[in-house]
Image (cartoon, rainbow, N blue to C red):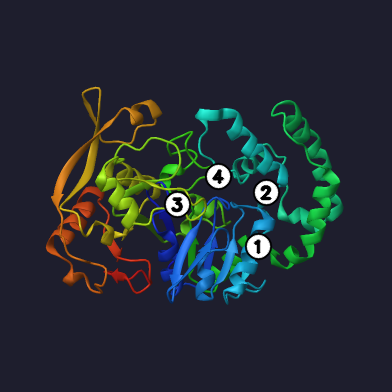
Amino acid sequence: MSNIVVVGTQWGDEGKGKIVDLLSEYSDYVVRFQGGNNAGHTMVVNGKKIISHLVPSGIIQKKRCFIGNGVVVDPVVLLDEIDYLIQNGVDVSSEMLKISNRAHIIMPYHRLIDNAREIKKGDKKIGTTGRGIGPCYEDRATRRGIRFADLLDFELFSEKVRTIMDEKNFYLKHYFNTDTLDPDKVISQFLEIRDRLIPYIADVSVILNRGMEQGKKVLFEGAQGTHLDVEHGTYPFVTSSSTVAGNAACGSGVGPCKLDQIIGIVKAYTTRVGSGPFPTELFDEVGDTLQSKGAEFGATTGRKRRCGWLDMVILKNAARLNSLTALVITKLDVLDELDEIKICTGYEYNGEVIEAFPPSIKVLENSKPIYESHKGWRKSTANLTQYKDFPDNAKKYLSRIEELSGVPIKIISVGPERESTIIKEKFF
């Protein structure tokens, strides 16, 4: 038996969707354990691009999929995504997808508050997607959240909505000076979709643990990346959930001893969407080349991604925080045409060398990356299917990543399609 956790090691957008899709073939269950529809996974199947935001990527491989208790879910977005997947020939019936009865619901007032805050902050905004994820997690922490289990008792659901919205409307009106919501209309909206949602609601923890006892292989799918983790990332320029591997257990309702392998997805360079420090960010032609050739636009927001060299400070930090057992390198082919490729091995701040990822945003913003230079390979890797055929300089680059991180590379991706993948060592 082998239960695998897939996490991003950078600031998200590392290509987890493709790798989860690939590994789903060898799994029985696929579980999403944190985040909300502020994340997006892009899969290319038979030349067709399919994007999911809430439904785990394994649904494409006809695997049973689960949305864990650690995920916050906008039910309207979820139903729209289910319809979209069905239109693309994907089975998203209630037999194939289950939502934890303990998962929290993103309510309409969460979205309003999220957007109002960003507007009020002006130039100091943190770059939230405005989808209500943060405010929903806040209500969960302050015990004012509404869960999917509440939909099963609609009288209780309605009572909770009215009580909570008294406070939310006061906040919207008197602090943000913006429109309020009618509780009865909100309740009516949920009444319209309740019957569609109920068949999907289940005790995911019980199903997963029962499956493991029967020998089922489970793939845990993370969203965003390690350095967007609310505790370990570039706070406050982070997401609102814990993105590291340890949360796979908490966010799905299984014990940590059930997690056998932790795979870190690493883009061959580094990208970031939105605000926040980015020590290796490039503002020259190389950065433009990476952005253009890598088609670096957010799957969820469509925002242009900032691009820079591979940063080993953050990769080593991710290896430690997640107990990584293997690396997957993605988008190596984007580097094919470069004469010189750099790797950041540390930061210089006030004349001192920093090798451990610092908690201070001020330090990060004023740190200069320390680079080592590598010769490019100037050959296409896009059509390669075996590692032995890689250019020597590409092999040296990959070996150096292994050496600096202390973690073996087991998969290399050189394109968006499933076929554009070299498996050095199998996980199952």
Disc with the residue nearer the chain's start (4 vs 3): 4
Task: Give the mark nearest the N terminus, 2 or 3.
Answer: 2
Q: Amino acid at mark 4?
A: Thr
Residue type for callout 1: Asp
Q: Nearer the viewer, mark 2 or mark 3?
A: 2
Answer with the quarter of the image where residue 7 lies: bottom left
Q: Position of residue 161 (x, y in %)?
A: 80, 44
Which residue is under mark 3?
245
Mark found first going from the N terminus, 4 or 1: 1
What residue did someone put label 2 on? 106
* Nearer the camera: disc 2 or disc 1: 1
In the displayed structure, 390 sits above or below 241; it is: below
- The answer for how far apart the CA atoms under marks 4 and 3 are is 23 Å
Task: Report helix, strand or loop for mark 4.
Answer: loop
Residue, disc 1: 80
Locate residue 174 relative to residue 218 in the image: left or right: right
Q: Is residue 65 visible?
A: yes
Residue visible at 31% across and 27% down in the picture = 366
Q: Secondary structure at mark 3?
A: loop
Q: What number of labels is visible?
A: 4
